[in-house]
């Protein structure tokens, strides 16, 4: 039986481990920075702000973490998370009514759907004893002009009932084009209400940031829950007992990633692929676990190659800029 020092059979838990399923939350320095900005905007009841990023930088992961942290910190506020639909037939108000489980009839009119949603938000806000509705919209670059106008209507309708509304957007760089388009239309009210404060999401921008991520695997993330077994210890129990830590090899792994980034620097490296590199190192190394295990350049190179990060960076560097 392959057990950890915590006394359980790790093979029984392997397939359900978050590193294997990739279903886990890790608060990076950039996410912590974004949260500090967004929590202040929510606390101050700003009408809206938005974050934008290149694809695969961890934007959606960030959006979900921000949602969970905000909901925990501000229990009297009503938070709704919505992922925009780029389908031309999509209607925001209908999608929101579906989101909250109130959609009944395909023939319901726009005004009926709007009224249904407003009543829902009022009830949710009242049940919490607050007066603030926060909608978090992922992929907001996919919202149509009509959808942005529907958001404005929702905002104004709620304001009539004494309810503040904040819209937090998470989008790809195309949202900057949408913002410019609104200026061209003279729709400055939409920009002022929802898109006046762009925040660039850069992922992992330094070796120090990356080391803090590795420390999460070494010390703060654990599985099984409440076992006291860190992610690193789970895959390398003997090495971990002999003081092995991923963070000790920060420079080695970072060097492997920078060899992909080249002169463009860390800003081109997608966060999702960086997580895959760390996960691959842990999963592959578990078969080599021993008290004298050391991470080698070969293990790191194999993990970087397997993540396909180089292919993704090359593809994105050939794509036209949206700025």
Image (tube, rainbow, N blue to C red):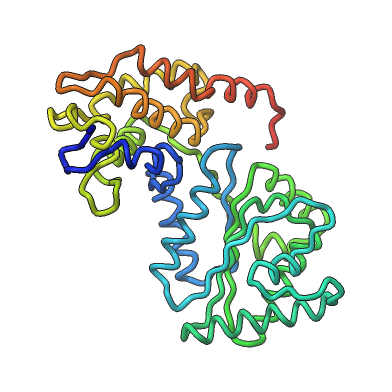
Whether 146 is drawn above or below 6: the answer is: below
Instruction: Kindly indicate the quadrant of the structure image that contains residue 163.
Output: bottom right
Of residues 140 and 106, the one drawn nearer to the viewer in this rendering: 106
Q: Position of residue 153 (x, y in %)?
A: 74, 74
Residue plotted at (72% across, 65% down): 95
Q: Which residue is nearer to you in this view: 14 or 34? A: 14
Spot the residue most to the front: 1
Q: How many marks?
A: 0
Considering the image in quadrants, where does the C terminus appear? top right
* Left or right, residue 297 beside residue 152: left
247 in relation to 216, above or below? above
Q: Is residue 183 left or right of residue 54?
A: right
Residue located 60% across and 37% down the image: 54
**Residue 92 horizontal/vertical position (percent):** 74, 64
Q: Could you tell me residue 135's position as x and y percent?
A: 59, 66
260 left or right of 164 in image: left
The residue that appears at 15% across and 23% down in the rendered structure is: 291
In the picture provided, is 36 more to the left or to the right than 158?
left
Residue 77, percent from left and from top = 48, 75
> Which quadrant holds residue 149?
bottom right
> Which residue is pictured at 25% across the width and 42% down the height?
230
Image quarter in which the N terminus is found: top left
Would residue 102 be seen by someone viewing this image from the given angle?
A: yes
Residue 48 seen: no
Q: Please, is residue 73 above or below residue 250 in the view?
A: below
Q: Is residue 176 above or below residue 282?
A: below
Residue furthest out toward the top: 298
């Amino acid at each position: 039986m392959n057990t950890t020092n915590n006394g359980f059979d790790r093979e029984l838990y392997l397939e359900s481990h978050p590193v294997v399923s990739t279903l886990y939350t890790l608060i990076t320095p950039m996410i912590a920075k974004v949260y500090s900005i967004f929590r202040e905007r929510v606390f101050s009841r700003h009408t809206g702000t938005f974050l934008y990023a290149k694809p695969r930088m961890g934007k959606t992961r960030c959006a979900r973490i921000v949602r969970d942290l905000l909901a925990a910190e501000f229990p009297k506020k009503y938070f709704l998370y919505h992922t925009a639909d780029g389908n031309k037939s999509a209607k925001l108000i209908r999608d929101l009514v579906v989101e909250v489980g109130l959609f009944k009839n395909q023939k319901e009119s726009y005004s009926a759907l709007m009224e249904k949603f407003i009543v829902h938000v009022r009830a949710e806000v009242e049940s919490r004893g607050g007066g603030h509705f926060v909608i978090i919209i992922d992929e907001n670059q996919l919202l149509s002009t009509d959808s942005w106008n529907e958001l404005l209507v929702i905002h104004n309708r709620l304001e009539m009932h004494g309810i503040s509304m904040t819209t937090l957007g998470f989008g790809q760089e195309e949202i900057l084009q949408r913002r410019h388009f609104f200026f061209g239309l003279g729709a400055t009210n939409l920009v002022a209400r929802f898109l006046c404060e762009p925040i660039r999401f850069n992922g992992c921008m330094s070796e120090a940031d990356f080391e803090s991520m590795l420390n999460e695997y070494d010390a703060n993330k654990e599985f099984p829950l409440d076992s006291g077994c860190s992610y690193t210890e789970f895959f390398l129990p003997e090495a971990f007992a002999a003081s092995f830590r991923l963070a000790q090899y920060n420079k080695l792994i970072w060097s492997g990633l920078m060899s992909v980034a080249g002169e463009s620097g860390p800003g081109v490296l997608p966060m999702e692929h960086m997580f895959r590199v760390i996960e691959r190192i842990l999963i592959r190394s578990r078969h080599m676990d021993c008290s004298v295990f050391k991470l080698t350049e070969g293990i790191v190179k194999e993990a970087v190659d397997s993540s396909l990060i180089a292919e993704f960076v090359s593809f994105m560097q050939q794509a036209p800029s949206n700025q």
